[in-house]
Amino acid sequence: MNDEKDTIAAISTPLGEGGIGIIRISGEDSFRIADEIFQPKKNIKTSEMKPRTMYLGNIIDPESGEVIDEVLLVKYKAPYTYTREDMVEINSHGGFVVQNRILEIVLNRGARVAEPGEFTKRAFLNGRIDLSQAEAVIDIIRAKTDRALKIALNQLKGGLSNWIREVRQEILRILAHIEANIDFPEDDIPGIDPKTITVEIKSLRAKLDDILKKAKAGKIMREGLSTVILGRPNVGKSSLLNSLLREKRAIVTEIPGTTRDIIEEYINIKGIPIKIVDTAGIRETLDAVEKIGVERALETLENADMVLLMFDASEELKKEDREIMELVKDKFVIVVINKVDLPVKLNIEEVVSAFPGKPVIRISALQEKGIEELREAIYRVVTEELGPVDEGVMITRARHSQAIRNAIEALKRAESALEKEIPMEVVAMEVREALDFLGEITGDAVGEDVVKAIFENFCIGK
Ligand SMILES: Nc1nc2c(ncn2[C@@H]2O[C@H](COP(=O)(O)OP(=O)(O)OP(=O)(O)O)[C@@H](O)[C@H]2O)c(=O)[nH]1
Ligand SMILES: [Mg+2]
């Protein structure tokens, strides 16, 4: 168990060659460590430096006296820092060896390596941000489109937190009304009519239902809509992936069974992140490697949000095509008829009638024709399914939607208790439960294991 009082350090920029690299230190020993390893051009102690001001100097290995790098160092004085602790940032040259040497020296002076997300975790534990804001930090880093970024940024600024706080305030008001009934049941003071309380709870529940309706869109904005390209070998799946990406990402050959592994890439359709997955062509095969590819394709299909089901217009419908059509029966399908630049042999009517009401797009992946129409169709299907995506308060995580669903269930139980005239204490208990469930989102009422799980998914140095 790592102590929350330790001074921690990490390389916060991605490792590799870069113009600069940043090593971050947080905790009460930060300034002392800086003093021991940093020799500023201006002779000044870290404690005397102006906060948030860059100082030029050298990092020196105190043990050997060797100069490691010329750097810029910034100090941040608690509590006005990312973690609310004293912090130091060393802007070194961005190189694998140099950054690791500096980190090593910092660690030798008594810091320990930060766990993934530990800086942000401290910001949460020290009360600078709540849990949903901490989650937004990683969402910003991982945002796949501009719109996804906006949603995450809104969450970081407290959009979701404020919304939850307001709802919790409403719950507290309702609780007060319920408790007035418990405390003075026989009193002359007229208690609040249980009917009024029922109305209040119902309207609150409607609010939660409404935001939950946007949860699917929110999840997709954060994670991307998983879209798998499926079809028998050689219909042009990899060619389509390449056209959508506008680069030669996947190998394309005239040999059926070219793609074996799963290839995943993100594309941006009007701000909606779409994860396109190219798969092995599905067929019976004796080739051991191809067989694994086919299995992987089928696994991917299970978790896909949408299927681009591809046919070759220049060939008649084959047994394999028909089998694949069966596989995707319950899925969200866009039918893609490829190779329309060649003479058509496919019975397109037969395919269309197998997917009534589904979009059918004719393309030539080779000549990049129809690709824009396909992008439009994907966008249309997504927005029809998800409803409009706004950039305001959104529920983007399963953790949050689960908490809201639990709160809704608790409120339903409260309503039914009121209806059955079960003692008000029971009603109060259920309503308080809803309050706690919502508190899980912001971290006001949340277990240590949940917090741990959230930050484990962060990157090092954030
Ligand atoms: N004429 C024509 N040929 C195409 C078109 N799209 C793909 N092809 C050709 O069809 C062949 C197969 O294309 P791929 O993209 O590798 O097909 P695939 O579905 O990924 O094949 P597997 O990976 O084997 O399942 C290649 O020779 C492509 O150049 C098209 O729109 N028109
Ligand atoms: Mg392929």
Image: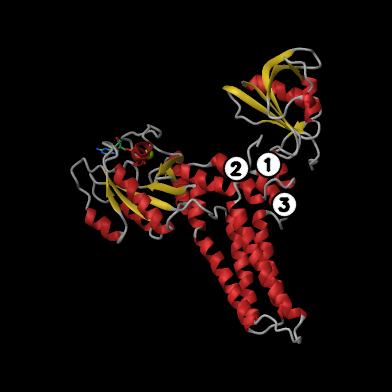
**Residue 390 in the image, given as x and y percentages of width and height:** 46, 53
**Residue 127 in the image, given as x and y percentages of width and height:** 72, 47
Q: Nearer the viewer, residue 13 or 266?
A: 13
* Placement of the N terminus among the 4 image quadrants: top right
Amino acid identity at mark 1: Thr
Instruction: Name the quadrant containing residue 169.
Output: bottom right
Residue highlighted by disc 1: 120
165 vs 186: above or below? above
Q: Would residue 25 be found to the left or right of residue 358 on screen?
A: right
Q: Give the alpha-carbon distance from disc 1 to disc 2, as whole Å.
A: 9 Å
Amino acid identity at mark 2: Ile
Amino acid identity at mark 3: Asp
Q: SS of the residue at dot 1?
A: helix
Q: Are marks 1 and 3 in contact (CB under 8 Å)?
A: no
Residue highlighted by disc 3: 449
Q: Are marks 1 and 2 in contact (CB under 8 Å)?
A: yes
